[in-house]
């Protein structure tokens, strides 16, 4: 199995080739470049599965492929030389994520045949080329073996999402949404860049794994009680970890940089599925998981991650409740679900966070592709109030969508329940000792209720009741290329929870937590990148309410109860033949929720009321002071030369006289200095 | 009585002063040329006098160079004067003042 890793670079390179092919020859190809993308992502998927099998048989891969700069490191501690390299790190986490990303990308490509090709879109070569580049960047990001390489592909992912969100660039809203996504995530990435520089400057290395990784260097710095840049080692680790977290918050759409994500719905629905399930948004959380050892060194950074995650989970869920557009509901659910993952990672639940990342990838891709199918059915209508009654007309879409919805709402036994419950359980046991985490847990718990409510509000409005428009009465046909990915993902949304049935394992004392063993390196792992290695670094205390089993039951019971009550409320309000809006009952809160808590407004105000005047003042300083100095120097010389040039009369006699006078003057001066006249 | 080097220097100074006076006061370009010639020759006298005084030949060699230079200068100068006359119908140096800024 050793040789199989030699093909690892091809996983990312296949989609890159597809990008080039689709861009150059897409116009002449039968499906406008779709086939290139499908073959490439299919190849990536096959190779990724091979990697997974290889890792399962106990192998790991950590290899530097290309070194593009070596320099003297001005590092505080650690190595004298710093190397910037491209390398590949395939450990259990990366192998798992590779499979997820390539699977979702593969299914999205197939779905695009039905969603884009069959609908007669123009610009398809551009679309498939962007998808290829997107998949390439994400796959390369996933198995990057150092922080700088990760940063580069992180940026490339952002660029690709810009291209794809703005795919319909002739509309007014899409380019603006694309710009917003790019700028907002870029704002976060700015901090990430600072973090990369800070880490490189501190430890002289940016490697994720191995003996000279920055994680190991940071750990020994804390043990030795070093002082880094005038801070204690732990404080400095916290600062750099939080800087990197800036990029995570931007990409994973956490509060307060979540505002780009709902607008990103302007892109094609297939792109939304890819962005939300496997690539762009997942990149942020994956980065935290990738360098979890570093975060584990800093309880403060972890607590901030957990709190931001818990808050975002609730915050986004409440906004999802009042949205009328099916894609908008899903957008807010994505923000909310990534909040859960952040909470899970923040409380040290590495396995729980990764587990939810995996399950979410399946069910959110399913829901978005389901929404795409609904949009095709509805002749491109996205308003849920114009849908209804699709249940009988499109049973495959309905049942797969329902599977995704049940997983999203966290209803037992669908996959979402198992991972969300594990996150909440981990948060609860830490929260019993740490009040901040308890607050985050409480917010995430309330969010479960809202999740159940908005999910089933969406399901009931879309599929149940009587058709509320002509399009809903006579839906458009959908082909196999739409149905097949839905079925695959529907099955995964149902069964993916088997990977880690932690509550069952704890209650029945049977060993079925496969994902935990997987991430703990029981098959193959890079040293230091395992769950138990992270566990040793964590400083969190845990406590139980009357024993472990009772705590498990309480955590699962409360979250299930809330999920059911949310779903039940949605059922009561909207599962009627002629549902009506109930927003009036929200009173004053309605306007706030529909305006998304005025987040856009305050950010626009911040840009227009603060940044712009500041930029204007800087511009004025530049125009007046800096330019003024430069201009006055040139004005002075221009003026003096315009006066001085008058001695050039054009009369050769004058010149000769000047020469002689000058010579005599020089003679006199030299004579005076030389002392002739004394 | 031997002729001391100071006599040569006085002669060369007088010649140079005459040439300089010509340049500063005359307006005719031909007179300019002659005055320049006088100044060059004043320099030549100086060179030869000091060569004789120091007893080596470099000054004399330089004087030969200067003569060649003077010949070339006259050729160029006459050419310029010819052009001046063609353009301005005059050889007065105060007329062509347009070639300044």
Image (cartoon, coloured by chain):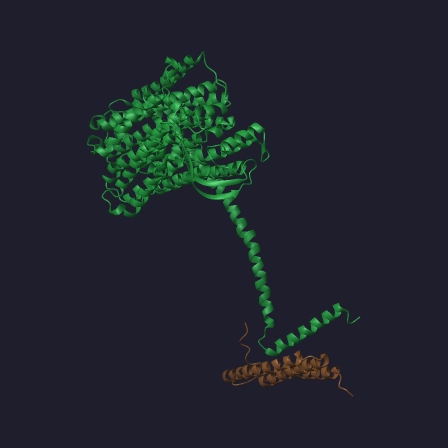
Q: Residue furthest bottom?
A: B1
**Image quarter hosting the N terminus of chain A:** top left
**Residue A53 sits above or below residue A506 on the image:** below
Q: Position of residue A124 (x, y in %)?
A: 28, 43
Q: Would residue A282 appear left or right of A658 to someone viewing this image?
A: left
The answer to which image quadrant residue A493 occupies is: top left
Residue B88 visible in the current orientation:
yes
Q: Would residue B32 appear left or right of B50 to someone viewing this image?
A: left
Chain B visual colour: brown
Chain A visual colour: green
Q: Residue furthest top?
A: A546
Q: Position of residue B90 (x, y in %)?
A: 54, 85
The answer to which image quadrant residue A472 occupies is: top left
Q: Residue furthest front?
A: A2
**Residue A364 sits above or below residue B59 on the image:** above
- The one nearer the camera, A666 or A587, is A666
- The one nearer the camera, A93 or A272, is A93
- The one nearer the camera, A128 or A643, is A128
Total numbered circles: 0
**Image quarter hosting the C terminus of chain A:** bottom right
Q: Position of residue A544 (x, y in %)?
A: 46, 14
Q: Position of residue A69 (x, y in %)?
A: 48, 44
Residue A328 visible in the current orientation:
no
Q: Residue at x 71, y 72 (%)?
A: A667
The answer to which image quadrant residue A221 occupies is: top right
- The one nearer the camera, A164 or A133, is A133
**Residue A32 sits above or below residue A320 on the image:** below
């Amino acid at each position: 199995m050793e040789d199989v890793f030699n093909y690892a670079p091809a996983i990312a390179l296949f989609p890159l080739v597809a990008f080039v092919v689709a861009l150059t020859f897409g116009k002449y190809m039968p499906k406008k470049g779709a086939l290139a993308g499908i073959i490439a992502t299919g190849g990536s998927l096959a190779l990724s599965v091979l990697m997974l099998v290889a890792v399962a048989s106990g192998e790991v891969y950590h290899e530097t492929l290309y070194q593009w700069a070596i320099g003297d490191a001005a590092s505080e501690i650690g190595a004298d030389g710093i190397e910037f390299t491209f390398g590949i790190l395939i450990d259990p986490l990366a192998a798992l994520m590779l499979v997820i990303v390539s699977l979702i990308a593969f299914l999205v490509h197939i779905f695009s045949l039905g969603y884009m090709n069959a609908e007669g879109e123009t610009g398809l070569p551009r679309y498939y080329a962007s998808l290829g580049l997107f998949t390439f960047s994400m796959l390369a990001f996933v198995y990057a073996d150092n922080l700088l390489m990760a940063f580069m592909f992180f940026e490339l992912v952002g660029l690709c999402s810009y291209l794809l969100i703005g795919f319909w660039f002739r509309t007014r809203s899409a380019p603006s949404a694309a710009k917003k996504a790019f700028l907002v995530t870029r704002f976060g990435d700015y901090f990430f860049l600072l973090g990369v520089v800070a880490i490189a400057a501190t430890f002289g290395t940016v490697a994720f794994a191995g003996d000279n990784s920055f994680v190991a260097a940071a750990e020994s710095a804390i043990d030795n009680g070093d002082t880094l840049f005038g801070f204690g080692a732990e404080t400095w680790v916290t600062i750099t970890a939080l800087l990197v977290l800036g990029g995570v918050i931007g990409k994973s759409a956490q509060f307060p940089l979540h505002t780009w994500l709902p607008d990103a719905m302007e892109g094609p629905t297939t792109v939304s599925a890819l962005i939300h399930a496997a690539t762009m948004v997942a990149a942020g959380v994956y980065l935290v998981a990738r360098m979890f050892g570093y975060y584990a060194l800093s309880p403060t950074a972890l607590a901030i991650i957990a709190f931001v995650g818990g808050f975002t989970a609730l915050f986004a869920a409440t906004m999802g409740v009042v949205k009328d557009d099916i894609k908008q509901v899903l957008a807010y659910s994505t923000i909310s679900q990534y909040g859960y993952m952040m909470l899970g990672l923040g409380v040290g639940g590495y396995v729980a966070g990764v587990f939810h990342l995996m399950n979410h990838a399946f069910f959110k891709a399913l829901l978005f592709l389901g929404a795409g199918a609904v949009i095709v059915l509805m002749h491109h209508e996205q308003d849920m109030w114009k849908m209804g009654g699709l249940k009988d007309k499109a049973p495959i879409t309905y049942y797969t969508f329902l599977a995704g919805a049940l997983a999203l709402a966290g209803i037992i036994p669908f996959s979402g329940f198992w991972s969300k419950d594990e996150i909440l359980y981990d948060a609860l046991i830490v929260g019993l000792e740490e009040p901040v985490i308890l607050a985050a847990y409480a917010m995430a718990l309330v969010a479960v209720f809202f999740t159940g409510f908005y999910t089933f509000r969406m399901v009931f409005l879309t599929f149940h009741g009587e058709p509320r428009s002509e399009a809903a009465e006579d839906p458009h046909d959908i082909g196999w290329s739409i149905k097949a990915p839905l079925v695959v993902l529907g099955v995964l949304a149902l069964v993916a929870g088997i990977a880690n049935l932690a509550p069952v394992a704890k209650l029945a004392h049977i060993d079925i937590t496969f994902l935990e063993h997987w991430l703990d390196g029981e098959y193959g792992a890079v040293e230091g990148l395992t769950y138990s290695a992270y566990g040793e670094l964590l400083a969190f205390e845990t406590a139980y309410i009357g024993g472990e089993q009772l705590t498990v039951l309480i955590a699962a019971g409360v979250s299930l109860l809330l999920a059911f009550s949310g779903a039940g409320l949605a059922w009561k309000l909207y599962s009627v033949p002629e549902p009506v809006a109930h927003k009036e009952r929200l009173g004053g809160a309605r306007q706030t929720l529909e305006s998304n808590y005025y987040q856009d407004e305050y950010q626009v105000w911040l840009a227009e009321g603060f940044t712009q005047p500041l930029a204007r003042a800087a511009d004025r300083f530049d125009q007046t002071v800096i330019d003024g100095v430069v201009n006055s120097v040139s004005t002075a010389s221009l003026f003096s030369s315009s006066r001085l040039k008058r001695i050039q009369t054009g009369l050769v006699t004058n010149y000769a006289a000047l020469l002689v006078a000058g010579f005599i003057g020089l003679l006199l001066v030299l004579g005076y200095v030389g002392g002739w006249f004394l | 009585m031997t002729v001391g080097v100071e006599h040569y220097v006085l002669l060369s100074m007088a010649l140079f002063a005459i040439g300089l006076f010509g340049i500063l006061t005359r307006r005719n370009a031909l007179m300019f040329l002659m005055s320049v010639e006088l100044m060059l020759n004043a320099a030549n006298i100086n060179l030869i006098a000091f060569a004789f005084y120091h007893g080596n030949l470099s000054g004399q060699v330089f004087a030969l160079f200067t003569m060649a230079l003077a010949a070339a200068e006259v050729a160029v100068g006459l050419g310029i004067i010819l052009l001046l006359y063609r353009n301005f119908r005059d050889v007065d140096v105060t007329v062509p003042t347009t070639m300044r800024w």
